[in-house]
Image (spheres, helix red, strand yellow):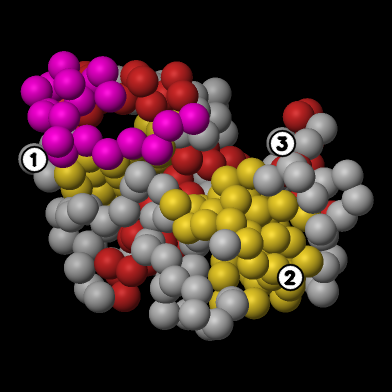
Amino acid sequence: MTRTLILQSQDAVTHDTYRFVFDRPEGFDFEPGQAAELAMCREGWRDEGRPFTFTSLPDEDHLEFVIKSYPSHDGVTEQLPTLKSGEKVTLDGPFGAITDKGAGVFLAAGAGVTPFIAILRARARQGDLAGCQLIFSNKTEADIILRDDWRGMDGLKVEHVLSEEKADGLHHGKVDAAFLDRHADLSGQIYICGPQGYVDAMRDAVKELSVPDDRVHTEDGW
């Protein structure tokens, strides 16, 4: 079922990532971690729907999305930051393979963190972050999405990994099986989201560390 949303507000989260807040249609529901397809109600863009994850919680009176813009792609994410309050988008959904299956390690790269935002926010609200760890890979420190939010979640263990610069207190390099063996407790659920190459690499890494497939949850193709 297609629904029409009205943009209430938007603001920058990082230099290239934005928070969009829309009204919430009556009777609409979703689970933390799920996504929907959004399309702008603009000439030439109505058929250009793309999947984005809800970052608001199911009991809130609005719908929120945190979306990274890619100007070099000359596409939807480049156009979204130009939306003004009062403009409309269409929504189809919800859908998505990643929902809360239990405490564990959340492996994210870049905008792949978005399915984990609502899951971890919901757990933080319930005081249920014991056993949860976010390992978040980015190119630079400036790319880290919602860093203050992660820092403020009592009980969440966070490891930031930067591939293109060094910063005090943060890891430099890449996440692989050796990194996970040193820094992660893989006894719980394993959630993976990011670019396809990252998803494949993390899936191989946890398999190398003998994590069974039924504890590994992925959202491919971000």
For the point 65% across and 53% down, the residue is: 38
Q: What is the secondary structure assignment of the residue under circle 2? A: strand
Marked residue nearer the N-terminal end (2 or 1): 2
Marked residue nearer the N-terminal end (1 or 3): 3
For the point 17% across and 21% down, the residue is: 207
- Residue 25: x and y in percent read 59, 77
Please state which amino acid type lies under the numbered disc 2.
Leu
Instruction: Calculate the distance from the C-alpha at mark 1 to the C-alpha at mark 3.
Output: 36 Å
Work out whether residue 138 can be spotted. Answer: no
Please state which amino acid type lies under the numbered disc 3.
Tyr
- Residue 186: x and y in percent read 14, 37
For the point 41% across and 48% down, the residue is: 96
Q: Relative to residue 124, is residue 203 depicted above or below?
A: above
Which disc, if any, is residue 187?
1
Q: Which residues are magenta?
A: 203-221
Quarter of the image where one finds residue 62: bottom right
Instruction: Calculate the distance from the C-alpha at mark 2 to the C-alpha at mark 1.
Output: 41 Å
The residue closer to the viewer here, 222 or 92, is 92
- Residue 71: x and y in percent read 78, 35
Marked residue nearer the N-terminal end (2 or 3): 2
Q: Pointer 2 and pointer 3: residues touching (CB < 8 Å)?
A: no
Please state which amino acid type lies under the numbered disc 1.
Ser
* Disc 2 crowd, CA 10 A, few/some/many (<14, 14-19, 20+): some
- Residue 98: x and y in percent read 34, 47
Examine the structure image and report whether residue 167 is included in the region drawn in magenta. Answer: no
Q: What is the secondary structure assignment of the residue under circle 1? A: loop
Camera-side mark, 2 or 1: 2
Q: Which residue is mark 2?
A: 7
Q: Which residue is mark 3?
A: 70
* Disc 3 crowd, CA 10 A, few/some/many (<14, 14-19, 20+): some
